[in-house]
Image: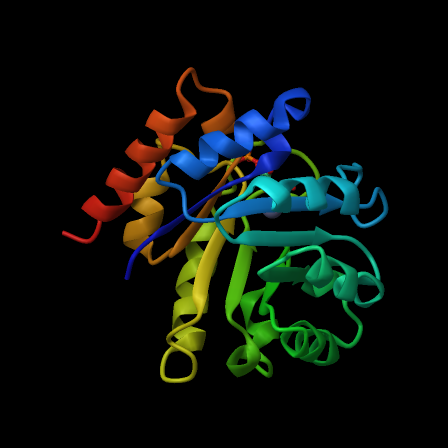
Amino acid sequence: MKHIIAPSILSADFGNLQRDIEMINQSEADWFHVDVMDGVFVPNISFGFPVMTAVKKHATKPLDVHLMIVEPDKFIPEFAKVGADRITVHYEACTHLHRTIQLIRALGCKAGVALNPHTPVILLQDVIEDLDLVLIMSVNPGFGGQQFIHNTYKKVQDLKRLIQGRNEELIIQVDGGVGLQNIGSLASAGVDAFVAGNAVFATDSPTETISQMKNLTSNSLI
Ligand code: DX5
Ligand code: ZN
């Protein structure tokens, strides 16, 4: 399985957004990770449709939209309309999760569910066949640049067990505190897709960092 690197534009320079998008376009990254925060589900506000539209205009790679918002059903159609390829909602924000997943798929997008650090993987057992991706949060959502929570490794194992024989195509994604120091071991543990904000944008050469991340994940396959 090819590993996926998804730089989070939350850590980009918004004064030079087009430049940073072009950088990701030119790099070995696979997706753009788009972190939408509403100030209610998480204690921070990031951006919404205008920024998402601007990203779509310049991006040549799929947009992986991570909705950290309450009542996501209200906004999912608009995110699909402005160019989301994948939409991930939080388990904790969805009263009718099955319905939300169907809504995302009916709009032609891939459907993902994110789990906060305190939410056990087993809670997805009755929808696991309906999902394209599960995002295991390795920090408490809301901010970039936080420290990776080690229990994530155990959750990756739990998820691998859950998808066995039921949905082995499902993409296991990890988000928060991912960098050169742990990406190789996460890949060995079974993670397919890696979100990285600070680890990419806070370096002198983001393109080079992405390339190193790619190498570290592919080495784990040898
Ligand atoms: C956290 C966001 C992440 C965040 C990752 O709430 O979902 O995508 O931007 O940032 P880093 O890689 O800096 O931890
Ligand atoms: Zn995210």
**What residue sits 39% from the left and 68% below the top?**
160
Residue 48 visible from this viewpoint: no
- On-image quarter of the N terminus: bottom left
The tally of labels here is 0
Q: Quadrant of residue 105?
A: bottom right
Name the side, left or right, on which 42 lies relative to 152.
right
Residue 27 visible from this viewpoint: yes
Name the side, left or right, on which 74 lies relative to 27.
right
Q: Position of residue 155 (x, y in %)?
A: 47, 59
Q: Position of residue 72 (x, y in %)?
A: 79, 62
**What residue sits 46% from the left and 35% below the top?**
24
Name the foreground residue: 111 vs 137.
111
Q: Look at the picture and state if 63 lies above or below 57.
A: below
Q: In the rendered view, how is the structure colored? A: rainbow
Name the foreground residue: 135 vs 26.
26
Q: Position of residue 171 (x, y in %)?
A: 44, 64
Name the side, left or right, on which 123 lies relative to 164.
right
Identity of the residue furthest to the top in this view: 204
Q: Position of residue 167 (x, y in %)?
A: 43, 79
Q: Look at the picture and state if 133 lies above or below 42.
A: below
**What residue sits 33% from the left and 26% below the top?**
208
Identity of the residue furthest to the front in this view: 57
**What residue sits 33% from the left and 53% below the top?**
3
